[in-house]
Amino acid sequence: MTPQDPVAPAASQGAQTFATPIIKVTEQVGQHVLTALDQPDTVAVLSTIVPGVQADRVVSIPLSSAELSQVQVLLQELVPPEPLEEADMPCVGFHCDMKRPEQSD
């Protein structure tokens, strides 16, 4: 697949995904998002970079409103009830290691 080829759906039995070899990442994610938004009932798109043996891949998944709600619930579970001190949440770029509060059994 060359950078000029259109984004093609990846074969899967689970959620529909779109995967292509890495090109200019901003261009590729944009292509994936636009392609995923064209799918029926799509209200959001989840994209990530998946490391591979020969090459990394950008993978995008179109989300329905029900799936987006599930993602929002999962993300909300990561937010601590009280803000963490900045020293307790080290960041690299915009990736921050959010420590979960201790859970009692």
Image (tube, rainbow, N blue to C red):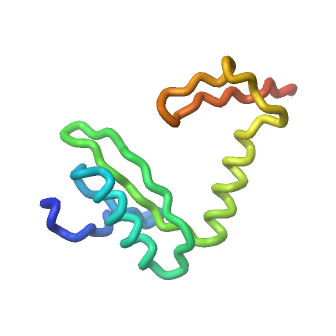
Residue 84 versus residue 40: which sits nearer the camera? Answer: 84
Residue 3 versus residue 57: which sits nearer the camera? Answer: 3
| Name of the residue lying farthest toward the bottom | 40
| Name of the residue lying farthest toward the right | 104
Residue 47 versus residue 105: which sits nearer the camera? Answer: 47
Q: Is 95 rendered above or below residue 4? A: above
Q: Name the quarter where the N terminus is drawn.
A: bottom left
Say which residue appears at 54% left-offset and 67% top-offset: 44
Q: Name the quarter where the C terminus is drawn.
A: top right
How many numbered discs, if any?
0
Which quadrant holds residue 68? bottom right
Q: Is 42 rendered above or below residue 82? A: below
In the rendered image, residue 46, in percent from the top left (x then y), is placed at 49, 57
In the rendered image, residue 99, in percent from the top left (x then y), is placed at 68, 26
Which quadrant holds residue 2? bottom left
Left or right of 90 on screen, residue 12: left
Left or right of 105 on screen, residue 61: left
Say which residue appears at 30% left-offset and 50% top-offset: 25
In the rendered image, residue 94, in percent from the top left (x then y), is placed at 51, 36
Left or right of 19 on screen, residue 21: left
Which quadrant holds residue 72? bottom right
Say which residue appears at 66% left-offset and 69% top-offset: 66
In the rendered image, residue 88, in percent from the top left (x then y), is placed at 68, 19
Residue 95 versus residue 50: which sits nearer the camera? Answer: 95
Q: Is 41 rendered above or below residue 2? A: below
